Amino acid sequence: MSEANILRSPYPDVDIPNLPLVPFVLGRVSEFPDHPAIICGVSGKTYTYAQLDDAVKHVAAGLHAHGIRKGDVVGIVSPNLPDFPVVFYATVLIGAIASTVNPIATAEEIGAQFADSEALLIVTIPELFEKCTAAARLASTVREIVVFGEADGATPYRELFAHGNTPPVVEIDPATDVAALPYSSGTSGIPKGVMLTHRNLVANLQQMQAVTEVIDSTSRVLGVMPFFHIYGMVVVMGGALRQGACIVSMPRFDLERMLQLLQDHKIRMANIVPPILVALAKHPVVTNYDLSQLKYLFSGAAPLGIELASACQERLGLTVRQGYGLTETSPVTHFHPMDDRRVVLDSVGPAAPNTECRLVDPVTGEECAPGERGELWLRGPQLMKGYFNKPEATAACMTDDGWFKTGDVAVVDDQGWYKIVDRVKELIKYKGMQVAPAELEALLLGHPAVADVAVIPVPDPDAGEIPKAFVVARAPLTADEVMAFVAARVSSYKKVRQVEFVDTIPKSPSGKILRRLLVEQERRRALPPSL
């Protein structure tokens, strides 16, 4: 491949410190020891930076006393609580690996993840102890469950504080030693453990500096994105703590509680996903709260349409920006600049510093010409080490010369700004023409009567596939009105040709539309009735 075909970041490269993750994230504690690091938006429990640093060291010593050694996996099954970062960074401090899981996952799903990751110890909340116990029976390596608080048969969290605050010094090679093992979303295929090294995570925090520098030790940021997910784990938890900001955490999303916290804590920046932005742009209850201190909304994890972003900016008088990334890239690879320079709201922005891109035809494997859509390939220091114990899966998405095949279809403009138009396998083929569901979804979210929407392909004898929209309406709306709205704004082959009204759109915790569930539902409907 010619070097000329590599699309480089417009930003100058940043220096990446050769440090383990914890000294990098918490290395500035002495600058603001008495500032709050994290406050629970429900209970009010608070850690100052000095207290957080001390708790991390206590729990690290406690985990070591409970038999955790370098390379061992500690599972975390918890909502966003102030002690989540304590356990996460304590695990990583002693060279162990933190593997996080969605707390609403089933026992079978949790058990499968921890069996695959070979977890030795699980940390959870009392309400999930029974479920984690059932999961542990499926993961034979688990030998202890610790709970925040108490539960019969569990190790109380406080016992981890009984071994002093001087954990053993462990030699860590940032380039090769794994710090975190989140699992990929599973929107296609079996979830896989993503091996993220200390250097991957440190590199990504450095690459995001242009985003996080808009906050400082006087700022408060919203912690609604799940810490178990790579977005919340790195961008929110790591990014805010590195800057000395205070995270106001939410154990679960609730719109009115979120608005109350934004108002009462005078939160300056909120990392969110498009469904939350929809509520901020359209829900009438928003006007009941004073959000004048909120200056930045940063959206990620799913495509954001220009109409929705513009509507939110105009309603709240703030700056909306978005970015792009994947679990496999730690996660950020693209983001909008946070200043007032040129911004294309429905783009994910230019590539991050130190990040290289290619656009490749997913069928032929040939480089795409300028302006053409192609699968986005990435290379940079934030790229994962590989999938845990799955060399074949790793080889399927990573080339020998270090390129990662994202599975996302993108197009880049002449200024180096990228737009993600869809997943490779989710493109709709209408009479051989490609139709991107995300494009139609973004368009429909601009309709004042549409609260949420998902678009999928459905089989058609003449066209091969046609777009079908699943619509959550906030006001009276007909299928004909939906189809006419789209038809007036797109090429004829992109028109929505079927509409179904639903109460909710299935989504992952990070806000990604789970189109595969709707596709599977349609397939079941198409089956002949059993005899």
Image (cartoon, rainbow, N blue to C red):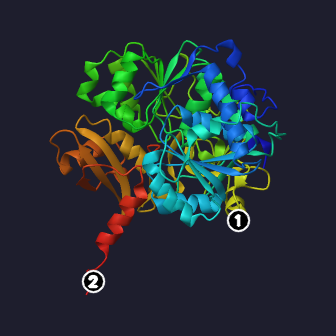
Q: Position of residue 311 (x, y in %)?
A: 34, 26
Report the front residue among 312 and 191.
191
Quote the CA–CA distance across marks 1 and 2: 38 Å
Q: Position of residue 73 (x, y in %)?
A: 68, 51
Q: Which mark is residue 530?
A: 2
Q: Quick check: 463 left or right of 38? A: left
Q: Earlier in the sequence, mark 1 or mark 2?
A: 1
Q: Compared with residue 95, is residue 164 higher up or lower down, i.e. above or below?
A: above
Q: Which mark is residue 392?
A: 1
In which quadrant of the rendered view does residue 361 lie? bottom right
**Which structural element holds mark 1?**
helix
Residue at horizontal 72%, vertical 34%?
21
In which quadrant of the rendered view does residue 381 lie? top right
Q: Are marks 1 and 2 in contact (CB under 8 Å)?
A: no
Q: Quick check: 33 left or right of 267? A: right
Residue at horizontal 62%, vertical 42%?
370
